[in-house]
Image (tube, helix red, strand yellow):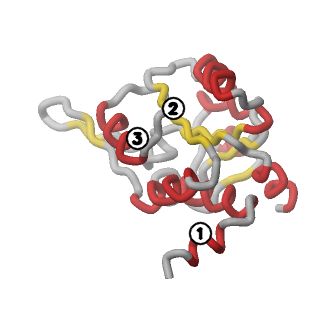
Amino acid sequence: MQDIIAKAANIKLVIFDVDGVLTDGSLFYGDDGQEYKAFNSRDGHGIKMLKKHDVEIGIITGRTSQVVEHRVRNLGITHVYQGQLDKLPAFEELSQHLGITPEQCAYVGDDVVDLPIMTRVGLAIAVQDAHPFVKKHAHWITPSGGGRGAARDVCELLMEARGVLDRELESYL
């Protein structure tokens, strides 16, 4: 675990996939074709807490959804790339734009489409219920599943590595 904490301490940008990471991967459609997704409120609060500690947050997702636009706006995430069937160009553009090396990036994924980025970053993270092949290529696997606390796990790991997690949690007392 010390190796993971050392890698996490170096992270300046964490990028999340959406379906299967910020959600449990379920897609709900209404009769009118409207798409619905369920997001975990504790994941969202973890992202808000992490943002206070000089870590940039990004989203790279293969699908395009207005629901995602609403969620990222609510969380104050401005680095958002939707409709990225090949996610690697978006990753390269974002890291270059922010002047952050791949070693200073963490990526959280759940499926094989996430591997091109995961194999290039300093901290590759798979959610607990990720595809087994993806888990094999991750530096760390979250205790929680996608859409069920995995993003909060990541945020708390990064805050712990910065030595600010206890202070952040205690601020609510």
Q: Is residue 136 above or below residue 153?
A: above
Q: Which residue lies at the image location 72% right of the left edge and 42% below the top edge? A: 124
What is the crowding at mark 1: few (fewer than 14 residues within 10 Å), some, or many (at least 20)? some
Query: How would you rate the neighbour count of disc 3 (Cα within 10 Å): few for under 14, some for 14-19, many for 20 or more?
Result: some
Quarter of the figure with residue 164: bottom right
Numbered disc 2: secondary structure = strand
Q: Nearer the viewer, residue 166 or 4?
A: 166
User: Which residue is labeled 2 in the image?
Assistant: 79
Determine which of the numbered discs, if any, sits on residue 72 in the image: 3
Which sits earlier in the primary sequence, circle 3 or circle 1? Answer: 3
Give the Cα separation between the discs numbered 3 and 1: 22 Å
Whether label 2 touches label 1, CB < 8 Å: no
Q: Position of residue 27 (x, y in %)?
A: 33, 39
Mark 1 residue element: helix
Structural crowding at the residue carrying mark 2, measured as other residues with C-alpha within 10 Å and reported as few (<14), some (14–19) or many (≥20): some
Q: Residue furthest bottom?
A: 173
Q: Is residue 57 left or right of residue 117?
A: left
Q: CA distance from mark 2 to mark 3?
A: 9 Å
Q: What residue is pinned by disc 1?
A: 168
Q: Nearer the viewer, mark 3 or mark 1?
A: 1
What's the distance in space between the residues labelled 2 and 1, CA to CA? 24 Å
Q: Amino acid at mark 1?
A: Glu
In which quarter of the view is residue 142 placed?
bottom right
In the image, what residue occupies the spot 61% across and 25% down? 94
> Which residue is found at the position 57% from the left and 18% from the top?
86
Q: For the residues labelled 2 and 3, say whether their Cβ atoms are less than 8 Å apart.
A: no
Residue 136 in sight in this render:
no
Q: Position of residue 37 (x, y in %)?
A: 32, 44
The quadrant of the image that shows the N terminus is bottom right
Q: Earlier in the sequence, mark 2 or mark 1?
A: 2
Q: Residue at x 63, y 73 (%)?
A: 167
Residue 120 position in % (x across, y down):
76, 29
